[in-house]
Image: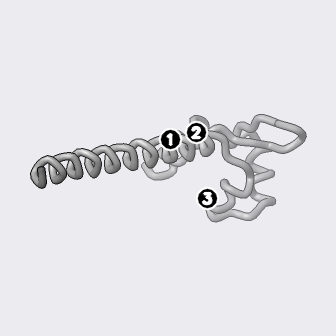
């Protein structure tokens, strides 16, 4: 009987570990989904530039933006190639 309890306990522990992993993966995927769209404050941090520089880059077309409720947002898919080209 004791061996059976130990085996059941191990199964429960394995299930809990798997559930925890799945929950963490789901949480990380949500974070990734949210960050596919960046705002100007994100770009200021990413490029270490002032708000004015980000606005100017947007006006010059260096950065492509999408307006949502009057606020400029930037797609990660558009920003990433810019970062790669600056690192080359």
What is the C-alpha distance between the residues marked 2 and 1?
6 Å
Image side of residue 57 versus residue 24, left or right: right
Q: Nearer the viewer, mark 3 or mark 1?
A: 1
Mark found first going from the N terminus, 3 or 2: 2
Residue under circle 3? 47
Residue placed at 74% from the left, 52% from the top? 40
Tag 2 and tag 1, C-beta contact below 8 Å: yes
Residue under circle 2? 33
Q: Give 3 or 77, whichever is nearer the viewer.
A: 3
Q: Give 24 or 57, whichever is nearer the viewer.
A: 24
Image side of residue 85 versus residue 46, left or right: left
Q: Which mark is residue 29?
A: 1
Q: Which mark is residue 14?
A: none
Q: Secondary structure at mark 2?
A: helix
Let me know if residue 82 appears in the view. Answer: no
Q: Tag count in the figure?
A: 3
Residue placed at 81% from the left, 59% from the top? 52
Q: Quadrant of residue 70?
A: top right
Tag 3 and tag 1, C-beta contact below 8 Å: no
Place of residue 83 in the rendered image (x, y in percent of width and height, measured from the top left): 53, 48
Q: Tag 2: Cα neighbours inside 10 Å, few (<14), some, or many (≥20)?
A: few
Place of residue 1 in the rendered image (x, y in percent of width and height, measured from the top left): 12, 50
């Amino acid at each position: 009987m004791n061996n059976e309890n130990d085996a059941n306990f191990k199964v429960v522990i394995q299930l809990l570990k798997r559930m925890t992993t799945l929950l963490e993966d789901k949480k990380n995927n949500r974070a990734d989904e949210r960050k596919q769209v960046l705002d100007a404050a994100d770009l200021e941090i990413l490029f270490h530039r002032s708000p004015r520089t980000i606005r100017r880059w947007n006006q010059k077309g260096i950065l492509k933006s999408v307006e949502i409720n009057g606020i400029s947002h930037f797609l990660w898919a558009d920003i990433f190639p810019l970062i790669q080209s600056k690192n080359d």
